[in-house]
Image (cartoon, helix red, strand yellow):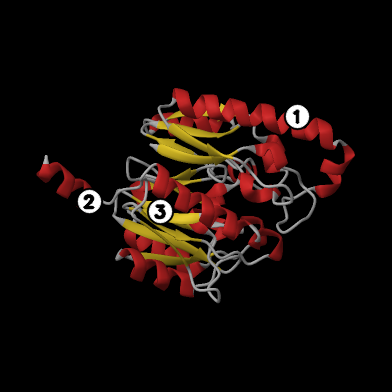
């Protein structure tokens, strides 16, 4: 697994565009919080590396503190990247910087064959609002808070993959990745209260009951659904012993990281990384056949 991370040198919490953001708390001790964020980031890097991930770490940009959450930068599949269009003005400056970085990765490391961007009129905030479900060969796309419903159709057309739009009904769960997590074994770890009744029905039409793992209020508040899944390992913010046990019953090992400085901005482990090497089953099968 190849993950993109952004160095937190320029991370801070100076505005609020989601209910989790605490600029007042940050302002009380900005030096201390930034020091804690750097320490937390290094622990995250170590944990991901031990779990078997390869990392591409890019620098942030002064004045764009949320670049530390690169999951929002793009949707990636089969060496193609569809870059985000941010709803809030505070994040729109990230678009050109991520475009430059992705083109650089395409030219320098040959990670991508194509890098393009959504139309300006279509808000869509990357893998934070569009999760690839490898077990089912489909995307799930959040809308209603940051991304538009139209974005699901744009993603489906670009990648040629079925994409199910899911309406998010609470500002606290402003991106799909804070309340929905497809797992390697085919399970979906999710927080039902974040979704409209219609969207819950759409999930349950596709995913059998035995593959649904419901997050509690505590799990959601701790940003545990916002996890990075590497094989049977789940890297996430500090979790309750009950959740660790429930996931262990399903065959998953939990690696916890203290991500509190980033949770102050409304982000967890998944927000802080973007998988660059997502592959569809079709591409994998063609590659095996060629070998």
Above or below, 106 relative to 58: below
Which residue is at a point 39% across and 42% down the rendered structure image?
Answer: 109
Left or right: 47 as drawn, with respect to 131: right
Q: Position of residue 50 (x, y in %)?
A: 45, 22
Which residue is tagged 1? 35
Left or right: 34 as drawn, with respect to 252: right
Q: Quadrant of the N terminus?
A: top left
Label total for image: 3
The reply to whether residue 79 is in sight is yes
**Does dot 2 land on a helix, a strand or a loop?**
helix
**Does dot 1 land on a helix, a strand or a loop?**
helix
Residue at the limit of the structure toward the front, as seen here: 107
Q: Position of residue 236 (x, y in %)?
A: 54, 35
Query: Along the polypeptide, which appears first: circle 2 or circle 3?
Result: 3
**Does dot 3 land on a helix, a strand or a loop?**
strand
In terms of depth relative to the viewer, which is nearer, 229 or 120? 120
Query: Along the polypeptide, which appears first: circle 3 or circle 1?
Result: 1
Left or right: 205 as drawn, with respect to 69: left
Query: Along the polypeptide, which appears first: circle 2 or circle 1?
Result: 1
Which residue is tagged 3? 76
Which residue is at a point 68% across and 40% down the rendered structure image?
Answer: 262
Which residue is at a point 57% across and 42% down the rendered structure image?
Answer: 272
Above or below, 84 relative to 258: below
Above or below, 205 relative to 55: below
Q: CA distance from mark 3 to mark 1?
A: 31 Å
In terms of depth relative to the viewer, which is nearer, 217 or 286? 286
Which residue is tagged 2? 283
């Amino acid at each position: 697994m190849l993950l993109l991370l952004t160095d937190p040198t320029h991370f801070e919490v100076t505005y609020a565009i989601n209910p989790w953001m605490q600029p007042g708390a940050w302002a009380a001790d900005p030096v201390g919080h930034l020091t804690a964020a750097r320490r937390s980031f290094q622990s995250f890097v170590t944990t991901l590396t031990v779990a078997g991930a390869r990392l591409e770490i890019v620098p942030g940009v002064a004045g764009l503190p949320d670049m530390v959450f690169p999951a929002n930068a793009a949707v990636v599949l089969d060496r193609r990247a569809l870059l985000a269009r941010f709803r809030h003005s505070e994040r729109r400056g990230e678009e050109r910087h991520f475009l430059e970085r992705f083109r650089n990765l395409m030219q320098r490391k040959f990670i991508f064959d194509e890098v393009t961007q959504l139309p300006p009129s279509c808000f869509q905030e990357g893998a934070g609002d569009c999760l690839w479900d490898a077990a089912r060969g489909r995307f799930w796309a959040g809308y209603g808070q940051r991304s538009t419903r139209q974005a699901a159709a744009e993603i489906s057309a670009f990648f040629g993959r079925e994409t199910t739009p899911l309406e998010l009904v609470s500002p606290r769960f402003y991106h799909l990745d804070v309340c929905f997590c497809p797992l390697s074994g085919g399970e979906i770890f999710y927080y039902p209260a974040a979704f409209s009744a219609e969207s819950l029905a759409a999930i349950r039409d596709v995913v059998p009951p035995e593959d649904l793992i419901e997050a509690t209020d505590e799990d959601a508040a701790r940003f545990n659904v916002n996890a990075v899944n590497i094989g049977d390992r789940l890297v996430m913010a500090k979790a309750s012993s009950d959740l660790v046990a429930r996931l262990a019953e399903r065959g998953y090992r939990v690696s916890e990281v203290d991500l509190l400085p980033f949770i102050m901005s409304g982000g967890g482990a998944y927000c802080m990384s973007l998988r660059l090497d997502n592959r569809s089953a079709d591409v994998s099968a063609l590659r095996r056949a060629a070998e």
